[in-house]
Image: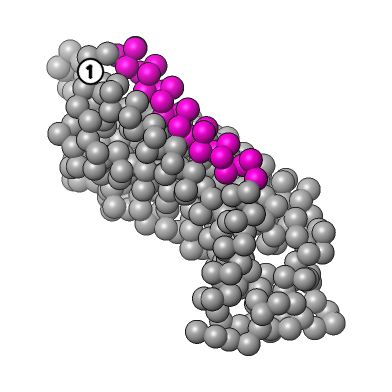
Amino acid sequence: MSTETGASDSTGGSASSSVNLESVRAVAKKDFQDSIRSWLFWGLSVFFFTLMAALAGFLSWANPDDLTTIGFISLVSQVCKLVIPLIALMLGWKSIAGERETGSIKVLLSLPHSRRDVLIGKLLGRTAVLTLSLIIGFLIGMVAVAVAVSEFSFPAYIAFLAMTIVYGLAYMSIAVSLSSLTRSTTMAGAAMFGVFVLFYIVWNSIQSALGLLMNRGYIEGVDYTATNFAGQQVERTRLPDWAQFINMVDPGNAYQNTITLFSSLSSDSIGTTFNEAAFPNGFPFFLQDWFSGIILLFWIVVPLAVAVYRFDRVDI
């Protein structure tokens, strides 16, 4: 669907326009090709291959008889939970802020590309770099994983790769969106650092703080009966549902909770992330596996929607 590109006025605003798919494709293709020619793409591919092969070798050495595909995925996902955001934030850091800082964004917008086309094209181009490097690294590393585990499940492994790509897209959406709202790479870098601190320090601290407040009686917890290792019934207390929901909104936690979805694709099995005894009436909807996918989708769509609205109105 072709549209007329909104021209910038004297105050730097631009007329709103719908998305031109051909224009988006052109921006994404150029951004992707520029990255392919650099060391970054090949460096990422080698990194992901080395990560999978090294972890497979180490886990096989540490646990030679009992390592399963799902067990491997469960452990590797903890590493990916930290590594993927760092890579996505670095890839998206200068995507638009760098071009605004050098002034090349004006040249790009002088071509038949609207601001929305540029924003979405940059997101798709950077995501394609991360996605292709993940696919290359994971598929080559799959040989080492297949040798290391006792019974390899190809469907579960591919599902894990797909979910890791979605997780990377969520953080790439956050990164490119923030980059579009900042005037310089310094400000964009500070924003990326802030996002990382938010989800890996502040978010976890909130959960710990809520637990401390519950233990001191400032928050009313939910009592339940559980069985300990000796087979005895004991009374315990968990955080209320609203506190559990806060924890689930973190994209990293949502990503790791999707691991239970892969059990149906393998002869292996993995227990639920949450204590079933703490929820005798069944898990609330936001603790169920499918909702983790909704959370990741939220972090893809919402930052992009906010950026599209704001980027149309900022002074370039």
Magenta stretch, main secondary structure class: helix
User: Taking 4 as reference, is 150 left or right?
Assistant: left
Judge by depth and name the residue closer to the eye, 1 or 240.
Answer: 1
- Residue 233 percent across, percent down from the top left: 17, 22
Identify the residue at the far right of this view.
10
- Residue 263 percent across, percent down from the top left: 21, 38
Q: Which residue is painted at 71% across and 77% down in the image?
A: 111
Residue 123 lies, with reference to residue 86, above or below; the image says below
Residue 124 lies, with reference to residue 161, above or below; the image says below
Q: Which residue is painted at 82% across and 64% down in the image?
A: 103
Q: Which residue is painted at 16% across and 17% down in the image?
A: 232
Secondary structure of residue under mark 1: loop
| Numbered range of the magenta stretch | 38-63
Judge whether residue 166 is colored magenta.
no
User: Taking 167 as reference, is 195 left or right?
Assistant: right
Query: Pointer 1: what residue?
Result: 66
Amino acid type at circle 1 is Asp
> Could you say which quadrant of the image residue 243 lies in?
top left
Q: Examine the rendering and report whether any part of residue 245 can be seen.
A: yes
> Could you say which quadrant of the image residue 255 lies in?
top left
Judge by depth and name the residue closer to the eye, 23 or 186.
Answer: 23
User: Taking 96 as reference, is 130 left or right?
Assistant: left
